[in-house]
Structures are given as C-alpha cells and as structure tokens.
Image: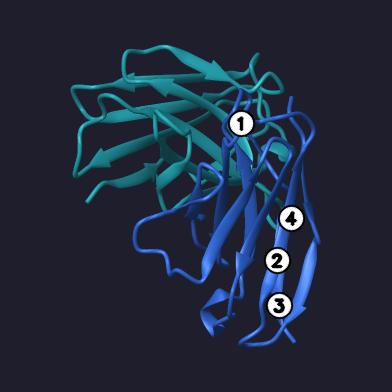
C-alpha cells in the first residue's frame, strides 16, 4: 500500500522560504506525477504543481515565481520550496500522487499545517 | 485556467435521500473530471475518476456522469458517513483546478 508523509517546519516567518518534503513508501516514485496541493484554513483546494519522476515540472502560474519542486529518487522523496511567504500562504499542505493516465489523485499524505507568522 | 463551478455550495439532506451535486467547467474537459470526498481534518479521498469510473473500494451508491463541460456526482441513498465536503477537479490541463466544494450536511 502506497503511503505518503509530509514533513517540515510548522511555522515559517514572513519573507522566508517554506520547505516541505514528502516521503513515499510502499511503492516506487518512478512512473507517476507527484504533486503538492494546499488548503487554507476553512477554504478550498489549490494545486501548487507537480514533478514527474524524471524531474520535469509544472507549476501553477499564480505561484510559479516562488515555487520549486524537486525529486530525489534515491530516497523516494520529493520536496517543495515556496519563497517569500506571507500570511496568505498559511495552509495545510498535502503531497499527492497523480495517475499518469487520468490525472486523478488516489494517494494523499495526511497533510501538514504550515503557519506563516512572526 | 479552467474554472470549475460546483452547485450547490451547501446542501442539507437526510439519511436515505438521493443527492446530486453538479460541476461545470469553463471549457470542455472531455471526461477528465474527478470527484473527492473530504471530512474535517482529513485528506481528500478519491471517489470517481474519469467522470464516471468508480474508484476501487468506494461504495456503489456513488456514481458520476457527464462529459464536456457538465458533470454530476450522485449519491443514491445517503448514509451517515457520507456527510462531508465534496470537490470536483479537472485533469484536462494545467494548472489543475478544483471546484469550490459542496458541503453536505445532515437535515
């Protein structure tokens, strides 16, 4: 059974960089699209971007200037960096696996709340 | 970006009711439409993919239909565990986008 687990600081200061890692277990990181999705408290879901195991990426244009997603296949991990954060970036951040054929998200991490505050 | 609009935004229903939630895309997305259920404090759970395919392990009372721009999620007979928020998501193009959610509450 594939499992995803987010890890990283729960509190980030304004203007700093948010960094999260997603560790994949129970399956290989190869041959799928690996995504980050976030959800501000009490609000809906926002797609941040994805990385293919080969390293190709696709980002939401609304965040593109601040986002970097990378993959480490040797560790079965992928990571998110979001720079110059503000309070508007406070959210639960999920990592998820997208099916290559239909783009649906069958596997999700439990989510991690990141709060941007001084 | 493709905009996804769900209706209604909230819905009150009783156990045993038949419920339909609608999702409309701002342009044609063929059948690249997925439905999720989310309960408080939990990650979304995939219910339906490719507009009408039932995800493994999901009860058969859930069904999806539609193509192009108009889609529906139907729950044939509501059970107590179905009270949650439901989201549609298009996977036709990037950026992937979600509907704003439909909150299904107990009447």
| Chain B painted colour | blue
> Percent x, y for residue A70?
40, 19
Mark 4 and 1 residues: CB-CB less than 8 Å, in contact? no
> Percent x, y for residue A50?
48, 25
Could you say whether the residue bearing mark 1 is in a helix, strand or loop?
loop
Mark-to-mark CA distance, 3 and 1:
27 Å
Of tags 4 and 1, the one toward the viewer is 4
The crowd level at tag 4 (other Cα within 10 Å; few <14, some 14-19, many 20+) is: many
The quadrant in which residue A101 appears is: top left
Mark-to-mark CA distance, 4 and 2:
7 Å
Q: Find disc 2 in the rendering and name its residue.
A: B20
Instruction: Of the two numbered discs 2 and 1 on the same chain, state the one appearing first in sequence.
Output: 2
Mark 4 and 2 residues: CB-CB less than 8 Å, in contact? yes
Query: How many numbered marks, from 0 up?
Result: 4
Question: Label 4 is found on which chain of the structure?
Answer: B
Instruction: Of the two numbered discs 2 and 3 on the same chain, state the one appearing first in sequence.
Output: 2
The crowd level at tag 1 (other Cα within 10 Å; few <14, some 14-19, many 20+) is: many
Mark-to-mark CA distance, 2 and 3:
13 Å
Mark-to-mark CA distance, 4 and 1:
18 Å
Q: Find disc 3 in the rendering and name its residue.
A: B105
Q: Find disc 4 in the rendering and name its residue.
A: B22
Kindly indicate whether the residues beneath marks 4 and 3 are on one polypeptide chain: yes
> Percent x, y for residue A57?
47, 15
Mark-to-mark CA distance, 4 and 3:
16 Å
Give left or right: position of A63 versus A101. Answer: right
> Percent x, y for residue A48?
58, 30
Residue closer to the observer: A60 or A22: A60
Of tags 2 and 3, the one toward the viewer is 2
Question: Label 3 is found on which chain of the structure?
Answer: B
Residue closer to the observer: A103 or A62: A103
């Amino acid at each position: 059974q594939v499992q995803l687990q987010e890890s990283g600081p729960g509190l980030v200061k304004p203007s700093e960089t948010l960094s999260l890692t997603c560790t994949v277990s129970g399956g290989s990181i190869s041959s799928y699209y690996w995504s980050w999705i976030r959800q501000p408290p009490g609000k809906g879901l926002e797609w941040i971007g994805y990385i293919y195991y080969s390293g190709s990426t696709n980002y939401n244009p609304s965040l593109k200037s601040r986002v970097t997603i990378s993959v480490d296949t040797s560790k079965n991990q992928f990571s998110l960096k979001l720079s110059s954060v503000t309070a508007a970036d406070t959210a639960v951040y999920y990592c998820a696996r997208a099916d290559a054929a239909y783009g649906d998200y069958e596997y999700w991490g439990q989510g991690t709340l990141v709060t941007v505050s001084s | 970006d493709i905009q996804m609009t769900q209706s209604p935004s909230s819905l009150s229903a009783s156990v045993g009711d038949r419920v339909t939630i609608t999702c409309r895309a701002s342009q044609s997305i063929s059948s690249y439409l997925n439905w999720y259920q989310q309960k408080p404090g939990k990650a979304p759970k995939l219910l339906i993919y490719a507009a009408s395919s039932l995800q493994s392990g999901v009860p058969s009372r859930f069904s999806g239909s539609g193509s192009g721009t108009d889609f529906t999620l139907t729950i044939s007979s509501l059970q107590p565990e179905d009270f949650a928020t439901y989201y549609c998501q298009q996977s036709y193009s990037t950026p992937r986008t979600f509907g704003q959610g439909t909150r299904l509450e107990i009447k």
